[in-house]
Amino acid sequence: MDHDAALLKYRIAAIHNPDSSEMWNNIGMCFYGKQKFVASIACLKKALYLDPFQWIAAFNLGLVHLNQQQYASAFHYFSVAINWKKDFSNSYMYLGITLDKLNDFESACQSFEKALELESNDCLILLNYAIVLFNRGYRILSAELFKRSEKIYEQMEDDEREPDMMDQRDVLM
């Protein structure tokens, strides 16, 4: 379903249940998909206002802020998401990316290691960690992680591959 069709359905749903945190989270992510970041942030913050312990809204706010290069805000929301859901590996991965952008390489590596502890065969985690290491000059370790990610990538079905993976893989090829 495209974002505009989803937003139309959510507009109707909002009439009947305007205080649904999940709905506002989904609306926020529709706006994120449409690259309307201010609207996305507003909706995601409303979702957190309605349910202050909704970890996924905090995680999604982290994604939007990371995309907007607002690294301190991204750090805050990924940390909140981790505090509420400690077993979601992607929170640690994106926190690692954020920490690297904030020039805290050691903590970034710790965050990636925690993500891999939770999901050792996640292609995206391995790939992002390899890119961070490559950019910091750790070519040998980066190459090892990239090879691991490539083995997993080759076994993935086409519908499992995220579109951004191709661009990220090109960085290291």
Image (cartoon, grey):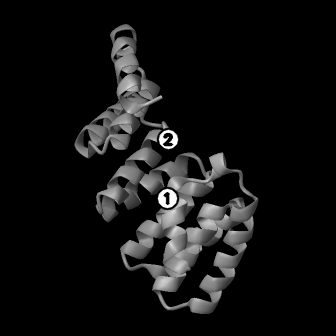
Q: What x and y, as percent, mark residue 147?
A: 69, 77
Residue 120 in view in this figure: no
Closer-to-camera residue (120/31) = 31
Q: Quadrant of the C terminus?
A: bottom right
Q: What x and y, as percent, mark residue 159?
A: 64, 46
Q: Which residue is outermost to the top?
A: 16
Q: Is residue 19 above or below residue 58?
A: above
Of mark 1 and mark 2, the one earlier in the sequence is 2
Q: Which residue is mark 1?
A: 164
Residue 20 occupies quadrant: top left
- The local crowd at label 2, few if under 14, some if 14 to 19, many if 20 or more residues have their Cα within 10 Å, is many
Q: Which residue is mark 2?
A: 56
Amino acid residing under circle 1: Asp
Q: What x and y, as percent, mark residue 78?
A: 45, 55
Which mark is in front, 1 or 2?
1
Q: Is residue 27 above or below residue 15?
A: below
Closer-to-camera residue (134/61) = 134
